[in-house]
Image: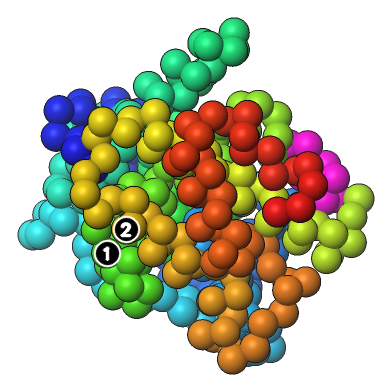
Amino acid sequence: MRLDDIDPTDNAQDLGSGGGGGGGGFGLLGLLPLLLGRGMGCGSIAIIGLIAIAWFAMGGGGGGGLLGTSGGDGTAGQSPTAGQSGRQVCQGELRLESCRVMRLADDTWAAIFREEGKQYRPATIKFYRGSVQSGCGAASSAVGPFYCPADQGVYLDTSFFQELEQRFGAKGDFARDYVIAHEMGHHVQDLLGVSGEVSRRQARASRAEGNALSVRLELQADCYAGVWAARNKDRIEPGDVEEGMTAANAIGDDTLQRQAQGTVVPESFTHGTSAQRVAWLRKGLETGDPAKCDTFSGNI
């Protein structure tokens, strides 16, 4: 996707390792509320189902996450300084790309909100390494990128992009851009009150019902990612759409569960199947209309 003429967002922070207050290197037990998608209200792109399977397989014990965080953010030889903010944070290839996607997403959704007579508030991209203390609680890079409505932050350890390419076979810049656009979809849901309503409904629901609501929320975020791309179709380059579809297919709950344990447990899905994720991303891309992203009515 062509982004070289986009100024990086001013709403960027470098939280360093541990997020300026959270300890680093904690096990999966501290992530359980986030993994189950209950109570904390955070939306994550993909790896939740895979990690949760491993957590239960280990009997709820601690230990490192399933995804290694080796690699970096494209700033070879540089060490980010916790507490930095603004454009000085958006240095290095992957961070710069991420900051440009954030700027374009903010501008795109601000325009859509104006069309509908609504007011838009920008999100903040919060880079970290290893672990972080977010407004939604403690998290690790093992969970993948996530959005926290409590501080309207998109949390990203850019080493995830290495995993996305090497472990999940989702290569290319648009695969990375889709990840961020999905999290910005959660930001839109937060501003519209959708995520808050889902959280309230989940609090009264059974585990299976709560998971089903989570799936619909996540699929809508995929659709919103497609809407963002459609509204910037003049920036789409050959191969971009295929890269996005490959990424969406790679991180479906059924695909991740099959890879992790060889079987699929539909009632434990929290993000949707590979086919569903591809279909809703495609719907957003083909329509460019957020009104077409109603995943809460009818079949998905």
Q: Quadrant of the C terminus?
A: bottom right
Instruction: Check the image and report above or below for 28 versus 77.
Output: below
User: Can you say which quadrant of the picture contains the N terminus?
Assistant: top left
Q: How far across and how far down the image is residue 101, in percent? A: 31, 37
**Tag 2: Cα neighbours inside 10 Å, few (<14), some, or many (≥20)?**
many
Residue 153 x, y percent position in the rendering: 48, 38
* Secondary structure mostly seen in the magenta stretch: helix
Tag nearer the camera, 1 or 2? 2
Q: Which residues are magenta?
A: 196-203
| Residue drawn where x is 16% and y is 42% of the image | 91
**Pointer 2: what residue?**
243
Of all residues, the one furthest to the top in this rendering is 117
Amino acid at pointer 1: Lys
- From this view, report whether residue 96 is shown above or below residue 106: below
Residue 31: give x, y in percent of width and height: 60, 65
**Which numbered tag is attached to residue 171?**
1
Query: Is disc 2 placed on a helix, strand or loop?
Result: helix
Q: Nearer the viewer, residue 17 or 166?
A: 166
Q: Do tag 1 and tag 2 residues touch (Cβ < 8 Å)?
A: yes
Q: Nearer the viewer, residue 12 or 300?
A: 300
Residue for point 85% across, 50% down: 203
Q: Residue at x 37, y 73 (%)?
A: 168
Residue drawn at x 60%, y 75% as measured from the top left: 254
